[in-house]
Structures are given as structure tokens and as C-alpha cells.
Amino acid sequence: ALSSTDVQHVFDNIDRSFQLNPENLIELTKTFLHEISLGLGAYNHPMAMIPTFVTGVPDGTETGTFLALDLGGTNLRVCEVVLHGDKTFSLRQQKYKVSESLKTGEATVLFDYLADSVDAFLTTHAASTYTVGGTKETPDVIHLGLTFSFPVEQTALGSGKILTWTKGFSAKNAIGHDVVKLLQDAFDRKHMHVKCIALVNDTVGALLSRAYTAGGCRLGAIFGTGTNGAYLEEVAKITKLGNSPAAAKGGYMVVNTEWGAFNNSKSVERSSQRSHLPSTPYDNALDRLSINPSFQAFEKFISGMYLGEITRNILVSLIDASPTPLLFRGKSTRILNKHYGLDTSFMSEVENAWEGPNRSLSGDQSAPDFATFDAEKLPDNIVRKLERIRITVIKELGFQESDVTLKDAAVSSRLNSGLEVRPADMDLGYSQIVRWACSLVARRAALLSGVAVATILLQTGRAAFAGEDGEFPTSTSTEKIGVGVDGSLIEHYPNFERTLRESLRSLVGEEVEKRVDIGLAKDGSGVGAALCALQALKQG
Ligand code: ADP
């Protein structure tokens, strides 16, 4: 059997494997900058750094009515967007489910479904008039912007080849094809008067829509099912544009980084100087069993699609621990046993129930002291929090209230410690363990999200690392640095933004971090697609 010290070791080791100190963050940021420069210099680099042919961001004065179609998240969304020209917009939308068989079947079937959804929307939801620049008319064609949130090699504002699928999609006969043409062909097959004129990534959409509603923005970032960022780059630095007309024009262009692929292990040069994402066994298991092993490496540390699964891996390993189970007395549930059975929203719920303070970056590096955990000695407010988590665990993971494993007296966490074990201790001890596992995984995700944001600030010259003396360069700038964000993680996960900012502070200093204005890009994909369609019309 295990002694209480052994038990503590198990928890401490897991805890340690998820920690990132400021030096780790700095090294990762340097590697990130390196991969960005590789991606700007050459096509076919894993961090794709895709030129979008969007040559500026809106200022809020744009007007028009457009359809927008959004594929790439949990749902398919069709919307009608009216830009009022005063930083405001109105929007009607309808969500449609994308079944597993559509995600993994023939591409034409998927795109026919997209066209059918637009058709259904036009029949039931849309207004009858579509205006451009204030003139009301029922046009022969309705202009549509497509938000397509997968890696695409864009060749113009309105065309781009699909490079790979991510986020659980794998439709056949799509890779290498022009996504706009696939969609337009589906519209044409159905004789619909809809013309897709702009292709935009959700990340670019977040940047554009935040720029529209805030009057300016530097970076768009998604922290939802997946993660990605898009920012305004100097054309001169996008050296892979070579002698193309876009390069000759100069100025700025929005670059879609596809940073979810940062540190893809297979393709990144593995020189000893470069630091790598600190994979734990739980990450390795996730990667190995994923549909895209060793791809989207960064995304697998950060995004909603994966955090629940990493947490599930930790919990299951504690349930299965030998010789003594360290969680739920070795009992699991159907939900816990199922690949991707634990949703990231469960973690959110657990942490909300806790509402406790987060550990600081430089602070306590060891796991909570589980082996000597004593519910009797806990203050009432903590007991109430743990009790709330226990209810969430029972409800969401499919345990029974009457389940002996959560109520049984003869239990093990204070294992062999010689202390009397009481049922209430174990209920609450389990809650403590579950909360700890959730916060480990989410905190690491938020710190790494800060690495991505800091990298863009450094790349665009808006920030600098601290010098040898540990001091950050002083600046007299008062410029706000706009960051438009979207996604359930940043929107709903407790303390996600706070931890992201903690990471930013350690990387670029407090002065810069304070000027970073993180704002939700509300309906970013819809409004972004509309703004992009408008730009396509303007560019002719
Ligand atoms: P998408 O990125 O697909 O457009 P979302 O931004 O809503 O959509 O992200 C969905 C992801 O967020 C899912 O992976 C889900 O597990 C996770 N999620 C949903 N609700 C929450 C929540 N309250 N807190 C944290 N994550 C959540």
C-alpha cells in the first residue's frame, strides 16, 4: 500500500509536470518568434502565416448588408449582417448542426448541406432587401462572405485552397480544392442567387469586427473549440510574397498565423536550443489517440476541444492508480471512460463553484496537501465550495448520489496515514482533487495563450523583452493595443483572461500589459465576413 507521503508524491509530480515558470514562457516565446519568421518567409511551413489579402482594418464607418456563412466551430451559422456605419451593426442568425457523418463524409455532401442551410435561412429568416452603400434594392445576386476556420492557402480575397482539416473535420476530396468554388458550385447546383465573394478565417473576422466596433484593433484571437490569431503585418516582412503585385503595393496586410500549429513536433527543427511545449503523459495520450497526431500541437494545449480530454486523462489515471486508487475509490463512470467524454465546460463549472484565488506564477509550486487533507479542519466557506463541486461531479460525470464510492467510509486518500477517515472527508477530498486537476490544465492553457499574444506584440514592435537586468524598457506611449477575442474559453472560463495577463506581464512587462485592451469580438465571424465582402466589392 501507499503511504501518505507516496500519495503526495504522485500529486506533486503531476502538479510539477504542468507548471510553467517565467523562464519557460520566455523560451517558448522566442521559439514562437522564430517559427513566425520561418512562416513569413516560406510557404509550406507548419505555422502557415497565411497572407489574407485584407490590406487594412475597418474604422467603424463601413456600411452595407451581407450574408455570412460560418463553418469551423461547433455549429454552422448563417447570418444576415447590416453594417450601420457608426460602429454598430444588426444581425439575424440561425445555427445548424453539422453531424459527424457530414464532417467526415464526401466534401460535396457537406457543401450541399451548407447551400441548403443558406437556402433555408433565406426562406425563413432574412429580410428581402440587401443594400450596399445605402441604396436599397433587391439585387440579382446576394453577396456572401464565408468564414471558414481551417487552414487555407489564400490566393485572393475570394479564393483559397484548403490545406488541411482540423477540429475533428476530415471530409474527403476537399484538401487542395478552392473552398469558395466548392461552395459556389453547391449554390449553382441549386440555382441560388447567392455569390460568395470573400473568404475569411474566424480569427481574421474577430480582428475586423473588433476593429469595426472599437474603431481599431491590432490582433484578433480565438480561444474556443480551437485557437488561432490574426494580426496586421507590414507587407515588407511577408517575404514569401516575393515579387507578387501584393508585395509591390507594400503597406500592411492581415496575416492569419494558424498558431495552433506552433511547435508541431514532426516538422519543427529539433535543435537543442529551441524549447518545446512541455508535454505530460496526459498530453501524449491525447495526441496519440487524436485524428491528427503531432499536428496542431499548440492547439492541443490550449483549446476547448482538448482541455476536457487532458483533464479526463488525469482523473482516469488517478482512478486507475496502483496499488491504491487515488480518486473515487477506483470507480469510474460511462462519461469518464469515454474518449472526449468530459467537456471543457465541466471544468468551467467546477472552477466557478470554487471561485478561489489562482496561484501566482512565482508562487507555490507544489500540489495541495492531499494526504493530510482533513475536512473537519476546513473553514465553512471552503466546505461549501467543495460541496458545490461534489454536486457538479455527481451530476456531470454521471455518479449517483447514492453511489457508495462517494459515500463509503473505508477509504483511501488519507491512506494508511493512520488517521480516521470519514465519509465527508472523502467526498470533499475528491472535489478538491477534481478542482486541482481542472485548474492545472486550464492555467497552463491560459499562460500559453499569453505567450501567443506576447509574441505578436514583440513581432510588431509594440513590446520588448526585459533586459539582462530584468528591467523592461520604459516607454512613454499611451497607445491602447487592441486585441479582439472570441471563444467560450476566454469568454466564460473563470480567470482565463487574468492568467493570460499574468503571462503577458512576465513576458512584456506591466506597462505594456496595461495598455493591452482585450475586448470581445461579438459575432466576429458574421461581421468579419460582411466587412470582408464589402472590401471585396470595393476592390472590384
Ligand atoms: P467555436 O469555437 O466552436 O465557435 P465556442 O467558442 O463556443 O465555439 O467554443 C466551444 C468550445 O468551448 C467547446 O470545446 C466547449 O467544450 C468549450 N466550452 C463551452 N462552454 C464553455 C464554458 N462555459 N467554459 C469553457 N469552455 C467552454
Image: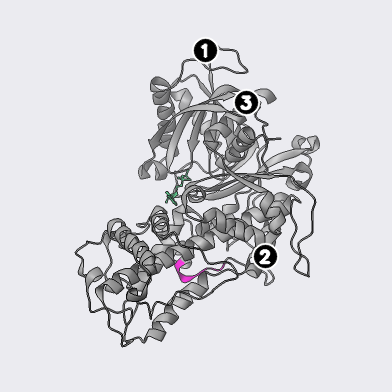
The disc at residue 138 is 1
Q: Is residue 540 visible?
A: no
Q: Quadrant of residue 504?
A: bottom right
Neighbor class of circle 2 (other Cα within 10 Å; few <14, some 14-19, many 20+) is: many
Q: Is residue 529 magenta?
A: no
Quadrant for the C terminus in the image:
top right
At mark 1, the secondary structure is: loop
Query: Residue 106: percent from the left, percent from the top?
Result: 41, 40
At mark 3, the secondary structure is: loop
Kindly identify the amino acid type of the residue bearing the numbered disc 3.
Asp
User: Distance between the Cα atoms at labels 3 and 1?
Assistant: 24 Å
Kindly identify the amino acid type of the residue bearing the numbered disc 2.
Ile
The disc at residue 26 is 2
Q: Is residue 280 magenta?
A: yes
- The single residue placed furthest to the front in the displayed view is 380
At mark 2, the secondary structure is: helix
Using residue 251 as the reference point, say whether residue 181 is left or right of it.
Answer: left
User: Distance between the Cα atoms at labels 3 and 2?
Assistant: 41 Å
Mark 3, residue position:
86
**Magenta residues (range):** 278-282
- Identify the residue at horizontal 38%, vertical 55% (top origin): 346
Q: Quadrant of residue 446?
A: bottom right
Q: Indicate which disc, 3 or 1, sits on the residue closer to the N terminus.
A: 3
Neighbor class of circle 3 (other Cα within 10 Å; few <14, some 14-19, many 20+) is: some
Q: Is residue 174 above or below residue 124?
A: below
Using residue 123 as the reference point, say whether residue 540 is left or right of it.
Answer: right
Q: Is residue 415 above or below residue 357?
A: below
